[in-house]
Image (cartoon, grey):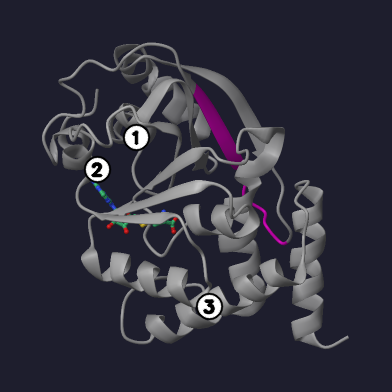
Amino acid sequence: MNQNIENIELLKNRLVDFSINVDETMLDRFEKYRQILVEYNQHMNLTGITEQREVYIKHFLDSVAIFKNGYIADDLSVIDVGTGAGFPGLPLKICNPKIKLTLLDSLNKRINFLKTVGQELGLNEIEYVHGRAEDIAQKPEHREKYDIATARAVASLPVLLELCVPYVKIGGFFICLKGPSVDIELGQAKNAMKLLGVRLVEKINVILPDQELKHNILVFKKEEKTPAKYPRRAGKPSKNPL
Ligand code: SAM
């Protein structure tokens, strides 16, 4: 089997493992996304990972692992905070085009890249937001308006909770991807969880092909309204975590 077909088979089989109904359009969109990523990466800083198998595993499958245990369903509104080159948000949309996706990042170049990808892949119902998470969360049209907020590789957990939880409706979920330091970060995030109104409901261990490091998905349920003073002004959450 040639390498390309082998990689597509791997992607397909792992998507099926996450209970996703895979079709040709989905696989084509993933490969097109990778090609645009590689092309744009030549003149802007998007990712250090460009080889097909690596992109499929470390970007696409890692992102899509969020589908585990059924939190993401049709018609839900999802905001991906600090989405960068679109992870985990865009792979979620490729797998379930019925979600209403918002991609947020403080770098406008990345937002413009994402608009190109969305257009080229023919994906509708994506809102692209350029700005700091701290500022956008104070806007009434975004505050506590989402069923789900997601994030990967944006900040340590106490900081990340302050940046993301204000977007989530009461009863909704904040879902993030974390590496091997997950338990230490959870220990440091107790105060932030209490102040922001969330409870940890699940820590899901994810095993990906070729990966030695442990990957985890943390699922927090929003149980109380987040006080209006959070998130604090831009830069403050990371300078002085809750
Ligand atoms: N989530 C992507 C991923 O997993 O590949 C990108 C990770 S990248 C290391 C972090 C991204 O978060 C960058 O694109 C950066 O611009 C964005 N970011 C960091 N702090 C932010 C903030 N306060 N508000 C909005 N975006 C932020």
Q: Where does label 2 land, which residue?
A: 133
The reply to whether callout 3 and callout 2 are in contact (CB within 8 Å) is no
Residue 168 lies in quadrant: top left
Q: CA distance from mark 3 to mark 1?
A: 28 Å
Please tell me which residue lies in front, 29 or 156: 29
Q: Residues within 10 Å of mark 1 (few under 14, many from 20)?
A: many
Above or below residue 19? Residue 195 is above
Above or below residue 153? Residue 37 is below
The residue positioned 48% from the left and 24% from the top of the image is 172
The residue positioned 48% from the left and 81% from the top of the image is 36
Q: Where does label 1 land, which residue?
A: 164
The reply to whether callout 2 and callout 1 are in contact (CB within 8 Å) is yes
- Helix, strand or loop status at disc 2: helix
Q: Amino acid at mark 3?
A: Thr
Question: Relative to 222, is 14 on the left or the right?
Answer: right
Q: Which of pointers 3 and 1 lies earlier in the amino acid sequence?
A: 3
Residue 164 lies in quadrant: top left
Q: What's the magenta region?
A: 210-220
Q: Which of pointers 2 and 1 lies earlier in the amino acid sequence?
A: 2
Residue 8's x, y, as percent?
76, 74
Residue 120: tell me if it is visible.
yes
- The numbered dot on residue 9 is none
- Helix, strand or loop status at disc 3: loop
The reply to whether callout 3 and callout 1 are in contact (CB within 8 Å) is no
- Helix, strand or loop status at disc 1: helix
Mark 3 within 8 Å of ligand 1, using the beta carbon: no
Above or below residue 115? Residue 188 is above
Q: Is 215 a magenta residue?
A: yes
Residue at the left extreme, as displayed: 233
Q: Where does label 3 land, which residue?
A: 50
Mark 2 within 8 Å of ligand 1, using the beta carbon: yes
